[in-house]
Image: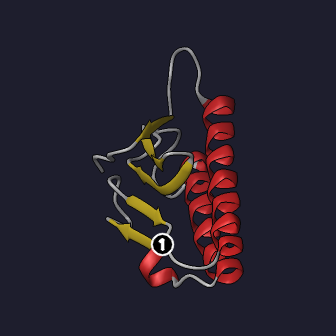
Amino acid sequence: MISVIVNREGNLIRAIYANGHAGYDKPGKDIICSAVSTLLCTSANALEDICGYDTDSTFRVAGEGTEDVSLRITVPDTGDDETKNRAQVIMRTCELGLIGIARDYNGSKKRYVEIINSRTPEV
């Protein structure tokens, strides 16, 4: 199962962490893992393109090519109010996409994505 932690500070999303393998299919063919990775990568790219944040400092991938891959997006506390608001729209959009994947693919017999809201991520 993919565990996703949404790290909030008040109403602001400060980071989104994801790790694990969905187990929907084998690695490289798993559409759920692909969808989660695509959402996180696209969000990181949007933080760079729309907000001007450096992807090298906001996006991390560990364990690439294994079943224990971890992805992390963090939002810096820099920029003007408009930049910070745009960053929150991007992060909330990512969160909504992850919620949609969990809703559409998790079943009563098998869960592929778990979303945890937390202030202190353990990943």
Q: Is residue 48 above or below residue 111?
A: below
Disc 1, SS: loop
48 left or right of 67 in image: right
Q: In terms of depth relative to the viewer, which is nearer, 27 or 87?
A: 87
Quarter holding the N terminus? Answer: top left
Can you tell which quarter of the image residue 94 is in?
bottom right
Amino acid of disc 1: Pro
| Residue at left offset 35%, top offset 53% | 67
In the rendered image, residue 48, in percent from the top left (x then y), is placed at 61, 81
Q: In terms of depth relative to the viewer, which is nearer, 34 or 18?
A: 18
In the rendered image, residue 70, in percent from the top left (x then y), is placed at 37, 58
Counting every numbered tag in the picture gives 1
Q: In terms of depth relative to the viewer, which is nearer, 75 or 61?
A: 75
| Residue at left offset 62%, top offset 85% | 52
Q: How crowded is mark 1: few (under 14 residues within 10 Å), some or many (20 or more)?
A: some
Q: Is residue 98 above or below residue 44?
A: above
Q: Determine the residue located farthest toward the left in the rendered image.
A: 122
| Residue at left offset 43%, top offset 54% | 17
- The residue that disc 1 covers is 76
Can you tell which quarter of the image residue 118 is in?
top left
In the rendered image, residue 13, in percent from the top left (x then y), is placed at 53, 53
Q: How has the structure been colored for display?
A: secondary structure
Q: In terms of depth relative to the viewer, which is nearer, 13 or 105?
A: 13
Can you tell which quarter of the image residue 49 is in?
bottom right
| Residue at left offset 46%, top offset 72% | 59
Q: Determine the residue located farthest toward the top in the rendered image.
A: 108
Q: In this view, does 78 lie above or below 122?
A: below
In the rendered image, residue 31, in percent from the top left (x then y), is placed at 61, 49
